[in-house]
Image (spheres, rainbow, N blue to C red):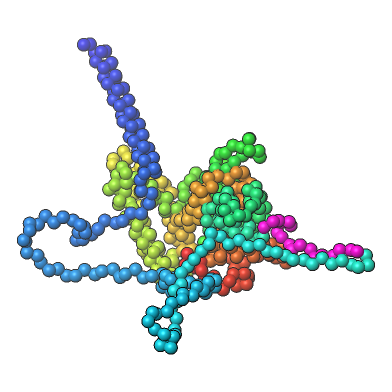
Amino acid sequence: MNQEEIVAMLLASREFSGKEQSYQSEIKTLKEQLAWYQRQMFGQKSERRVPDMPPEQGKLFAVSSSPVGVKTQEVKAHTRKMRQVLSKDEENAPEGTFPLHLRREEIPIEYKPEGYSDSELEVISEKITERLAETPGEQYVKRYVRKVYKVKESGELICAPAPEHIFGRCKVDESFIVLMVISKFLWHLPLYRQHQMLKLEGVTLSRESFADWTIKFAQLLSPIASALKQILFEQKFLHVDNTPGVVGRGAKKREKSFDQGYFWPLLHPKIGVYFEFSRHKAYKSFEALINGYAGTLISDAEEIFEKYVKAHDLSWQLCWMHSRRNFVEAEKSNPQLAAEALQYIRELYRVERDIRERKILDPEKVSRYRTDNSLPLLDKFRDWLRKTCATAEALTDDLVSKAIHYLLSRWDAAVLYISDGSLPMDNGADEREIRPLKLGLKNYLFCASEVGAEAAAVFYSLIHSAKMQGIHPYYYLLDLCKRIEQPGLKAADLIPHVWKERFFKEAVPEHLHGVLDST
């Protein structure tokens, strides 16, 4: 074999080796993708991780390897955890005790002991057993009786005008419309199911009317939602996120097509949450939504958010939940490195829990506490990230490498909350307000049109902002029907946290004051 043949064989071998490595890398990537899809379908969804037990604590059902008959040694008793304390509601209202405002139906039970005459018995007291009962639904009809007068001389007929309605003329009362939208946008009950439930009660209404009332009501309340957005823009920081939903196109049923739209929640925990719908998830959509805001954004590192804060020179707090989520994913490929990272993050959240338990509310005191307790942890974590990212173990693992790069490359944004005690360390508040919308979409599957999606955004904004303020949504929306056109009131006067200060005691029954404070 001559030299040229040897060189050709070596080149062919090297080429084959390169292709093999490429194939192995591709196979590894495909296996990781397959494992991810399997976890989404069949695996555990919770990101909660329980720390490993201390070495001195054994498993409850561990099988002993000691032979039978070996003498045992008495050890000191361990300290048991206290029994979980009941919540305030459970403690004050044990099962079987019902509010006094509920209607009582007296059912006397006629009973007389056998073998005794009336003169031998005397009733000295009563024992009462109460059981909560319910009917499928209680609808009632308001009958407005208006007398018609006739002027004897002229024959003119005079009658009082029909009572006012938010829609002018309508076959259902405002209370029905309010309960209808709450059933859909708070309890996730689609309009067609509500329609079917009413039919079972013998109430016949048009299906199209349900959708028409919903959209008209949303359009009536949209100025209040817009005022809520303006108040949110005045706050020092703002949570931002987005979530997809299926929304229809086309006015006619035969031309109807469905594709993806996006809901954008903007939230401040002391004010409320505002949802806005857009057809696209492009940077321009977010720029139009957030245009004019000059505070701190709290979000994940999605490209549109990161690009916006850089383009407009805004302060940015990176969400630690998303950083943690990347290391949870990395557990599948490298449990040991992922566990070390998760332990650091667990300690950071422990500091936040301590702040809440100590009831430290002043931002300056919160910042000092974080500086004393969280900052040393962050310094150690950063050193660990820098050291680990250069190891062969991390460089050859895509998931670990991605998780480290995600956090390390945005470190300044991740640690902003240390110097500003008013900032939370994650975007969890916004994600929690997305859940009701996602649960609703799982039930009614889609919004039939963009107008319907915009109506949904209005109701999710007002209903869930009311809940955040501890306001019963039914009485809030019902009161808005009375005040929406009241002279002297502006839309900004009717957003939930302002409305609560002015009209709460008047509009909400006393027995429901504080009913949402513990939720």
Q: Is residue 127 magenta?
A: no
Front residue of 270/255: it is 255
Residue farthest to the bottom, as pictured? 119
Front residue of 46/309: it is 46
Front residue of 503/113: it is 113
Magenta stretch bounds: 155-172
Q: Is residue 201 left or right of residue 54?
A: right
Secondary structure mainly formed by the magenta segment = loop
* Residue 317 vertical placement versus 25 (above, below): below
* Residue 183 vertical placement versus 110 (above, below): above
Q: Is residue 336 left or right of residue 210?
A: left
Q: Is residue 370 left or right of residue 261?
A: left
Front residue of 236/201: it is 201
Q: Position of residue 233 (x, y in %)?
A: 59, 57
Q: Position of residue 481 (x, y in %)?
A: 67, 62
Locate the N terminus by quadrant. Answer: top left
* Residue 512 vertical placement versus 55 (above, below): below
Residue 129: quadrant of the picture = bottom left
Q: How many marks?
A: 0
Q: Position of residue 123 (x, y in %)?
A: 44, 85
Q: Going 47% across and 56% down the picture, which residue do you hit?
A: 432
Q: Is residue 165 left or right of residue 393?
A: right
* Residue 421 vertical placement versus 282 (above, below): below
Q: Is residue 159 magenta?
A: yes
Residue farthest to the right, as pictured? 153
Q: Going 53% across and 71% down the picture, which residue do you hit?
A: 105
Residue 5, can we see it?
A: yes
Q: Going 55% across and 50% down the picture, which residue do you hit?
A: 193
Q: Position of residue 472 (x, y in %)?
A: 56, 65
Q: Going 58% across and 56% down the picture, which residue do you hit?
A: 201
